[in-house]
Amino acid sequence: MKKGSIGFNHENLVPTNIPETWKAMETLYDSGKARAIGVSNFSTKKLSDLLEIARIPPAVNQVECHPSWHQAKLRDFCKTKGVHLSGYSPLGSPGSTWLKGDVLQNPILIATAEKLGKTPAQVALRWGLQMGHSILPKSKTAKGV
């Protein structure tokens, strides 16, 4: 855990009333203060529940998505509902507890990169684009990947 972080304790969670929050976002959209409204980290279930009550559907659902975590069910659901999927961490999240291994060390990604004369990072980014996502890469270092 990072120094100064509060950690994950149930006492630190603040319940969110999604219908009320979404209604407020629709008001911002109607007023012209927002050109689009969307969600982040919504599962298929959460997105389905929101779509049932939303007057204005979300334009985008931003979730972690990369060659090791395809989000296929969610991606297909978003596509059928006209919600754009935007993938953050398209190069993976090294050190994450839920992923087995580093995305950029995936043998298939490495072999594809070598065959194409590209880096594994370039192949991972291209995968996201070819899947139809917008991609939001970042680096923890000034050098990048």
Image (spheres, rainbow, N blue to C red):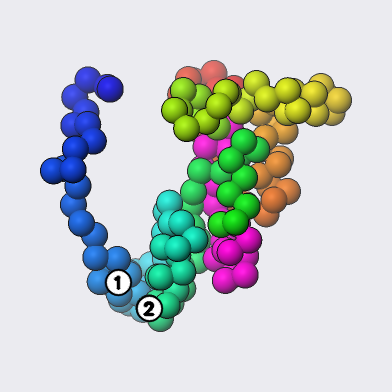
Residue 2 lies in quadrant: top left
> Taking the image as drawn, is residue 38 in sight?
no
Three-letter amino acid code of the residue under disc 2: Ile
Marks 2/1: CA–CA distance? 7 Å
Give the camera-side residue of 15 and 39.
Answer: 15
Asked if the residue at tag 1 contacts the one at tag 2, i.e. Cβ–Cβ closer than 8 Å, the answer is yes
Q: Is residue 126 above or below residue 28?
A: above
Q: Residue at x 49, y 61 (%)?
A: 44
Query: Residue 115 location in percent, x, y?
Result: 86, 25
Picture quarter containing residue 1?
A: top left
Q: Which residue is mark 2?
A: 53
Residue 84 location, x and y as percent?
A: 57, 61
Q: Secondary structure at mark 1?
A: helix
Look at 75% across and 28% down and name the residue there. Answer: 108
Residue 95 horizontal side relative to residue 145, left or right: left
Q: In this view, which residue lies farthest toward the right? A: 115
Magenta-drawn stretch contains 89: yes
Whether residue 18 appears in magenta in the rendering, the answer is: no
Q: Secondary structure at mark 2?
A: helix
Query: Which residue matches tag 1?
Result: 19
| Left or right relative to 69: residue 112 | right
Pick out the residue farthest to the bottom.
55
**What amino acid does circle 1 point to?**
Pro
Q: Is residue 88 above or below residue 2?
A: below
Which mark is first along the chain, 1 or 2? 1
- Magenta segment range? 75-91
- Give me the residue at 52% from left, 37% from top: 89
Report the side of 95 relative to 114 (left or right): left
- For the residue carrying disc 1, how many other residues have a C-alpha within 10 Å: few (<14), some (14-19), or many (20+)? some
- Residue drawn at x 73%, y 23% is 107
Q: Nearer the viewer, residue 76 or 136?
A: 76
